Amino acid sequence: MSVDRAGAAITRVRRELRKSAALVMNSGALAIGTVAAAGLGFVYWWLAARLFPPEVIGNTSALLSVMGLIGTLGEAGLGTMLVGEIVRNPGKERGLVAAAVCVGVALAVGLALLFVFGHAYFNSSTALIGGWLEGVTFVFGCGLTVLAILADQAFLGNLRATGKMIRQVLFGTLKLMLIAAAAAGGYTSHAALLLSWVAGLLASVAGVDLLTRGGARRLVGPPDFQLLNTLRIKVFDHYALDVALQAPGLIMPYLVLTLLSPAINAAFVSLWMLVSIASLIPAAMATVLFPVVRASPKQSRPNILLSVVTSLLFSLVCAVFIFTYSQTILAVFNPAYAEIAGSSLRLLGFSLLGSTLKFHACTLARLGDKMRKASRWFALGGFLELGFVIEGAKLDGLQGLVLGWTLAISIEGACAALILAFAMKLKSIAGHAHDRPTSPPLQTCRPRRP
């Protein structure tokens, strides 16, 4: 009898996994890409910390954080819109992706030019852009950042997350090879580090198309600006939510540089990079929920529970690891970093728990088409984060800054947990008629062969 029960239990588990196959497969591909990118990113910054002066690391990481912020502003909610709307517009996907790329890249380049000229005009004491080469590289990098984001989101919207996985692995590998080549040639300047990043980004975008035999090119066709225009309200709502959610985290290295010093920022970025990479796992799972639940709303509750529980467990493991080994990790990057930061960064990993809950609350808002309303609350949370960070830095330097950030994120996470629990209790996640897909069944959305 016990054997029969065990067999029945295994059968039930298999049945549930088949129902969540799209979530599991796409989340798995994103997780593999993220883990690979994490390992390669760790080696990249470890090598940079060993070969470049702390001031160079601090300045370059701050400029890259600005590039990431401009990428988010330039993406303008278009990528998130693609994730949710591709499945609802069968036959029109390529035109929608092309129109989004045109608008997003143009906006990012314009914002990057404003930053470059504004930085030169005001002659900031933190000389992040020292000459025309760095300026051109920065502007080009901002455009490429948006292009990469939109390509990744288009892959995800088509439930072909392997494309994003391949690009992530290529980016991590190529930028590592480039920084090693630069160091071997004796180029250890701010410009060399920036060029390795941007060149790796360009090569990853071209490489994913080659490795998928034109898979990236098949995502785009003649731009359909008319369709994009009909979705402009949703694009704006996604944009407001994306900026409110991501902007404070993206600008953190720049804040540390401004509030403290380049050397402290170099130490901070070492652990911040690991925390940011770790956060990509719960962020990826929450993002995959968007197209998966849209395609199969009846399976929304078990999919969301699976995603939340798995993400929280992963975040807790990472938080405990960083708390225990923060100084060891810093010393691995550069022995000087452990002396600069001490034990001030050990609580940084616990912010992952709050971030995980925020990511899933954000997805819940997207599923209910309540992005604009949610963005106001996330914006309020962003101001809370920045306020706590600034006050913490003034009161107790780096340790106060980290404590302020973690406390603010934890407060937001607790609020997000209440929202998620309430929504799950009401069973009101995505079962509304207006959330049902207009596309064919999920089977038609499986990854296509190149």
Image (tube, helix red, strand yellow):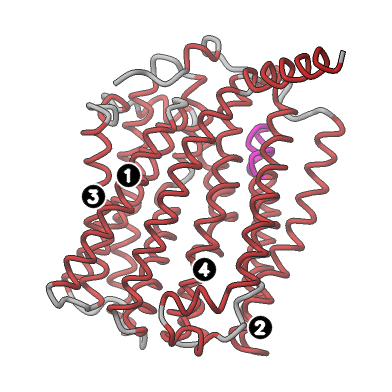
Q: Work out whether residue 376 or residue 409 is closer to the camera in this orientation and state it.
A: 409
Residue at the disc numbered 2: 400
- Quick check: 427 above or below 380? above
CB atoms of marks 4 and 3 within 8 Å: no
Indicate which label's residue lies in the foreground, 1 or 4: 4
Residue type pointed to by label 1: Leu
Residue at the disc numbered 1: 147
Q: Which percent across, then down, holds residue 417?
A: 79, 49
Residue type pointed to by label 2: Gly
Pointer 3 or 1: first along the chain? 1
Residue at the disc numbered 3: 202
Indicate which label's residue lies in the foreground, 3 or 1: 3
Q: Which percent across, then down, holds residue 205?
A: 27, 43
Q: Could you tell me how far apart the alpha carbons at marks 4 and 3 are, in whole angstroms? A: 24 Å
Q: Residue drawn at (27%, 64%), measured in percent from left and top?
A: 138
Q: Which secondary structure lies at badge 2?
A: helix
Q: Residue drawn at (34%, 82%), measured in percent from left and top?
A: 122
- Quick check: 312 above or below 26? below
Q: Which percent across, then down, holds residue 450?
A: 29, 21
Residue at the disc numbered 4: 272
Pointer 2 or 1: first along the chain? 1
> Which of the labelled discs sits on residue 419, or is there none?
none
Q: Could you tell me how far apart the alpha carbons at marks 1 and 4 are, in whole angstroms? A: 24 Å
Q: Which secondary structure lies at badge 3?
A: helix
- The residue range painted magenta reads 362-372
Indicate which label's residue lies in the foreground, 2 or 1: 2
Q: Residue furthest left?
A: 185
